Image (tube, helix red, strand yellow):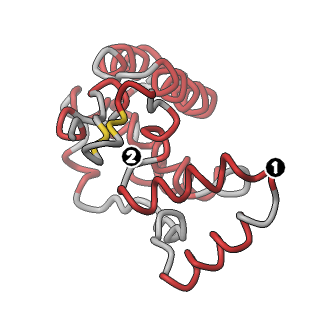
Amino acid sequence: VEQAATQWVEQHSARLGSAKAKRNERSLLKQLIHRLGSRKLKSIALDDFKDYQRTRRDQVGERAINLELRILRNTLREANCWRAIEQHYKPLREPESNVGYALTMSELAHLEKIAATKAAWSIAYLAEVLAANTGLRGIEVKRLQLGAVDLANRRIQIQRKSTKTAAGQRL
């Protein structure tokens, strides 16, 4: 498992954009190798996946376990050893996150009212007002430069380097 999974992660990491994503992938691999590294790929069975889920659950959450086992799944798939396990394997159910929901208008008004009360919060307040009224993402607000703001024409130019995708570049 160790040799094949390491090779898969190296090949997969070449397609990852950020250094952080590559480090995360190597960290997931390290955990997998610690537990199953000495095993032969052909000896891995559905029970190994279930045991891994059960024992690892005491240490980390469902998302981390699923990501670690994703490496093993893809490694087995490339070695043509996955088919017998695939139809019975079930990833752990990950709890729904409350991150990423939009504020209601009343929540937004409350946030702006409170943020405007302290001078020390002025930058955060102005960034929030800008984001709320333009749809800019947090990273786009952080990377915004004065030259990109045209107050006379009420335009902000967002450069590709500050967006997630090329589709994010816009006026």
Check the image and report above or below for 27 versus 103.
above
Residue type beneath disc 2: Ala
Front-lying residue, 101 or 13: 101
Q: Residue furthest front?
A: 152
Query: From the image, which quarter does the C terminus lie in?
Result: top left
Numbered circle sitting on residue 63? none
Label 1 element class: helix
In the figure, is residue 85 to the left or right of 59? left
Q: Who is closer to the viewer here, 134 or 65? A: 134
- Residue appearing at x 23%, y 49% in the figure: 84
- State the image coordinates of residue 71 (x, y, percent, origin top left): 39, 34
Asked if residue 46 is positioned above or below residue 109 in the image, the reply reads above
Question: 153 or 109, which is in the foreground?
Answer: 153
* Mark 1 Cα-neighbour bin, 10 Å: few <14, some 14–19, many ≥20: few
Look at the image and tell me whether residue 64 can be seen: yes
Q: Residue 120's mark? A: 1
Place residue 17 in its image quadrant: top left
Q: Is residue 166 left or right of residue 148?
A: left
Q: Secondary structure at mark 2?
A: loop
Residue 103 versus residue 86 in the image, above or below:
below
Q: Which mark is residue 45?
A: 2
The answer to whether residue 117 is left or right of residue 37 is right
Residue 45 at x, y percent in the picture: 38, 46
Task: Give, as a three-letter code, the residue at label 1.
Answer: Ala
Q: Position of residue 85 (x, y in %)?
A: 28, 51
